[in-house]
Image (cartoon, grey):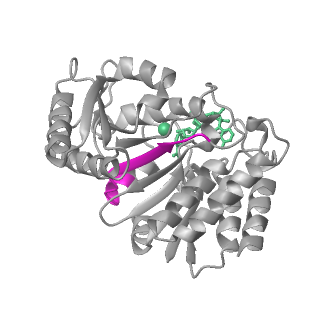
């Protein structure tokens, strides 16, 4: 496997080395290609991501990504939007599942759902007109875009409980009617039990009764917001992994951002990134390794080995180090 490794900015520079130490513990045949991207690069060189960087990413089988800072500068082009579009990674997969010994906002921990977020269009189309008096962002829903994310979600649902929830706001935004119709048709055609909910009341239902959901499919911005919100269910933003999947490329990253408020202090929770690494291993077919990694994470958590956001006293690098050691003893 040829793996592009992007630390990015802020805590990306701390959580990625922790995950890489764990990957190295498996002693697999992996060629790691470091790629510098993000705000730091922009400050230094005037560009956050170059065409050459995109080519390098495309030459790799997949990408392990930390986080990047996006400054509120109209001239700054979002690195992530660029990559997701250039590599056409249309499905953003965000599993939400409780971890052992970590409390979220509920006593009950019998929930396990996946947010399937459309990743290339919607309100993140990048089509904008910025003015002093009026600024607009165009929300784009295409049949092709809706169809491929609906197909992905139905396939996923088929391997799970065959239960799909389509989340939209078609009562107000007619663009969502197309999204809803295509998702409904696809679910009907594939025999998936489905229902749809308006995003506002859905947000309430998801946070109060997460055990009622299995696979959730939604548009770009809604998926972004709902997944961060779901962090509260499992104990924090430092615990949510994700995969960006297209027909050719795959890209694994924590859901959280560069967390400038805690960057440089070696206290960021590396588990979101380590769980993203687990998704990478599963995607690549390294099922045994993924299982050992899960066991190592569970064992660390059960022994209280965690960062301050979970009430622990361990540093980012210590958590990575202890999990890597556990893996070495299991091989
Ligand atoms: P954020 O996710 O970076 O941080 C939100 C809050 O969660 C902060 O208080 C932070 O300390 C905490 N947090 C996040 N990850 C954590 C971890 N692993 N361990 C412990 N605490 C953690 O979101 P925010 O503050 O809204 O954005 C900061 C920067 O990150 C912005 O420039 C934003 O554009 C960028 N961003 C980048 C993303 C990416 O690279 N995929 C995604 C989201 C935001
Ligand atoms: Mg986000």
Can residue 258 be spotted in the picture?
no
Give the residue displayed 59% in from the left and 40% down from the top: 98
- Give the magenta part as a residue range: 83-98
Q: Position of residue 248 (x, y in %)?
A: 32, 67
Quadrant for residue 139, please give it: top left
The image shows residue 43, relative to residue 195, as above or below, that is: below
Can residue 197 be spotted in the picture?
yes
167 vs 187, left or right, is: right
**Furthest residue in direction right, as rendered:** 313
Q: Position of residue 34 (x, y in %)?
A: 58, 69
273 vs 152, left or right, is: right
Viewport quadrant of the C terminus: bottom right
Front position in the image: 57 or 42:
57
Q: Position of residue 7 (x, y in %)?
A: 61, 58
Q: Position of residue 35 (x, y in %)?
A: 54, 66
Q: How many marks?
A: 0
State yes or no: residue 113 in magenta: no
Give the residue displayed 14% in from the left and 46% down from the top: 189
> In what quadrant does ligand 1 lie?
top right
State yes or no: residue 85 in magenta: yes
295 vs 70, left or right, is: right
The image shows residue 134, relative to residue 80, as above or below, that is: above
Give the residue displayed 66% in from the left and 47% down from the top: 10
Front position in the image: 233 or 228:
233
Front position in the image: 59 or 202:
202
């Amino acid at each position: 496997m040829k793996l592009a490794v992007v630390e990015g900015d802020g805590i990306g520079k701390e959580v990625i080395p922790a995950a890489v130490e764990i990957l190295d513990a498996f002693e697999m045949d992996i060629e790691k290609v470091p790629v510098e991207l993000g705000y730091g690069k922009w400050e230094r060189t005037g560009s956050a991501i170059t065409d050459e960087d995109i080519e390098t990413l495309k030459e790799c089988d997949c990408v392990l990504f930390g986080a990047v800072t996006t400054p509120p500068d109209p001239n700054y082009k979002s690195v992530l939007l660029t990559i997701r579009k250039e590599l056409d990674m249309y499905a953003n997969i965000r599993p939400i599942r409780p971890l052992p010994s970590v409390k979220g906002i509920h006593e009950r921990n019998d929930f396990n759902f996946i947010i399937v977020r459309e990743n290339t269009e919607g309100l993140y189309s990048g089509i904008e007109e910025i003015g002093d008096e009026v600024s607009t962002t165009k929300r784009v829903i295409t049949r092709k875009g809706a169809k491929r994310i609906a197909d992905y979600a139905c396939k996923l649902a088929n391997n799970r409980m065959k239960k799909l929830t389509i989340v939209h706001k078609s009562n107000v935004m007619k663009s969502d009617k197309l999204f809803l119709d295509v998702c409904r048709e696809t679910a009907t055609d594939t025999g998936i039990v489905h229902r749809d909910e308006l995003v506002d009341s859905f947000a309430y239902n998801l946070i109060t009764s997460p055990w009622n959901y299995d696979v959730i499919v939604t548009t770009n911005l809604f998926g972004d917001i709902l997944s961060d919100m779901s962090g509260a269910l499992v104990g924090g933003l430092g615990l949510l992994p994700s995969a960006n999947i297209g027909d050719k490329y795959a890209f694994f990253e924590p859901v959280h951002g560069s967390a400038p408020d805690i960057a440089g202090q070696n206290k960021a929770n590396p588990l979101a990134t380590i769980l993203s690494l687990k998704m990478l291993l599963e995607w690549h077919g390294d099922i045994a390794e993924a299982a050992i990694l899960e066991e190592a994470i569970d064992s660390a958590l059960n022994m209280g080995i965690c960062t301050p956001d979970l009430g622990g006293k361990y540093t980012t690098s210590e958590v990575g180090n202890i999990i890597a050691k556990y893996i070495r003893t299991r091989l």
